[in-house]
Amino acid sequence: MKKKGKAKKAALWTGGIMAFVVVAAAAGAYLYIEHLNDNIQSVNDDGASTGGFSKDKAINILLIGTDKRTGAGNEKYGDSGSAGHADTTILLHVSKDRSNATALSIPRDLIVDIPDCPTTQEDGSQEVIAGETGVRFNTSLGQEGRTPSCTARTVTELTGIKPDNFMVADFNAVKTLTTAVGGVEVCLAKDINDRDSKLNLTKGKHTIEGEDALAFVRTRHSVGFGGDLSRIGLQQQFLSALMRKLKSNDTLSSPSKMIKLAEAGTKALTVDSQLDSIDKLKDLGLELGRLNTKNLTFTTVPVIDNPAEQVKTTVVLNESTAPQVFEAIQNDVSFTAVKQQKQKEAAAVAARLKGTKADASEVRVQVLNGGAPSGSASETLTWLQNEEGVSKSENAGNAPASLAKTTLEYAPDQADQARRLAEIMGLSGSAMKPGKSVTNSQGLPTMTLTLGKDFKGAGKSVTAPTKAPDVEKSTADKVECAK
């Protein structure tokens, strides 16, 4: 672990992460405070991230917290000698156009496969920490010497989404950030007196900070069904309230609050090695600061009780809905009703699918592999010829470069052929690329179908979702009372 300034070991918790990210842009006004850089801890990303967010792309930030008890005043919560776990984890996806974002909570008790994790040791050497199958997600951090980069690899393995960056923070982040803004308003649908978390509040609205705020996000036995999934809902409510307070004029117009937030945020954060300066955090904050809280959706990975257990303590993926959630995020689909920024362009793209369609026997196409699994071009060719009647097709080998999305390029006079092949393949209008034809092995003009990384196999539609699945969710602009 790298530390700018004096060395310091910190416990981690997710609560303050999103808060500092949102105000990082405002904190940029105080960049003259050089010592803010000295507050920041970083840990090697070990190649588990994309290498850092980009201003012209969608952003995926992994927010990680542990139940490690180090830090002033936290030893009273017990388990003081624990190495900690990935106790609270959120994958924050911000759309390419910055019009919306999705905060996806990952249950700590979800059964997953943890991959082998190349991990940088304190002396700079590399060690591969062996993976495990069928274990709880929370063991991806802290256990067996695993660092946050291993949690990032586990999230990629689970969701198919590779984080651009990751952040972690300590228990004290909740205390210091809520105190810095003068408390946040939460709501309870009933009285709660939880001896474990030490939360003691009556029914109704309360403004909480410090120890009360930490107790609020830690309680689980007194809400919902008394488990981790109920606590996730409570934490999402808390983060929504904190977001609203951070973006309020009361906070943004107060220089003293902004300084306190900058100080608290940098001291609470541990970031990956690609995000280890105020300048980088400021740039990230400027991107995220464009969000409207009504278009920030909180949801949770869809799960069901683990059928292998008689006493239900863990959960597994809901295979009917979880893949839809992951695919929606992968394809930058909003979970809120955000107006399309480019309606005319979208209409033009959709129009490529409208019109006459040639017979399958008249479709002439060459198939290339541009990032799909090995053998996909051959498999697709066989399927097209034997199952779909596209006899005028051939395998053209590997494409010059890998593509994220499958594409079909065609000349204007091949549009009717393109529409038929799009129907057969399940291609969207955006996959169709009007351009030019090429010459096949017989010297005849032909279209070019390039199978990208999104290719799912012959006979399976590659149309990206345009609407998010109907799952339980909430948005950051609404006040909800914990039940």
Image (cartoon, rainbow, N blue to C red):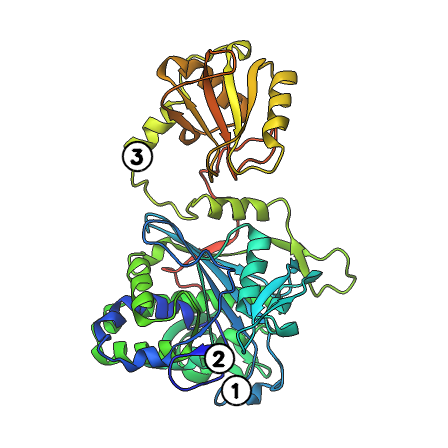
- Choose the circle earlier in sequence order: 1 or 2: 1
Label drawn at residue 121? none
**Quarter-of-image position of residue 79:** bottom right
Give how far apart the Cα atoms at labels 3 and 1 are. 52 Å
Q: Tag 1, which secondary structure? A: loop
- Rendered location of residue 267, percent (x, y): 39, 80
Instruction: Name the residue beneath numbered marker 2.
Output: 171
* Disc assigned to residue 343: 3
Residue 38 percent location from the top left of the image:
35, 81
Mark before the other along the chain sequence, 3 or 1: 1
Which structural element holds mark 3?
A: helix
Q: Position of residue 81 (x, y in %)?
A: 62, 86
Amino acid type, label 1: Asn
Drawn side of residue 390 relative to residue 478, left or right: right
Q: In x, y percent, where is residue 162? A: 50, 54
Specify few, some or many for label 3: CA neighbours under 10 Å numbering under 14, 14-19, or 20 or more. Answer: few
Residue 431 seen: yes
Q: Are marks 1 and 2 in contact (CB under 8 Å)?
A: yes
Q: Are marks 3 and 1 in contact (CB under 8 Å)?
A: no
For the question of whether residue 183 can be seen, the reply is no
Q: Which mark is residue 74?
A: 1
Q: Nearer the viewer, residue 55 or 169?
A: 55
Residue 284 against residue 350 in the figure, above or below: below
Instruction: State the CA–CA distance, disc 3 to disc 2.
Output: 44 Å
Residue 313 or residue 352, whichever sits in front: 352
* Mark 1 to mark 2 CA distance (whole Å): 7 Å
Indicate which disc, 3 or 2, sits on the residue closer to the N terminus.
2
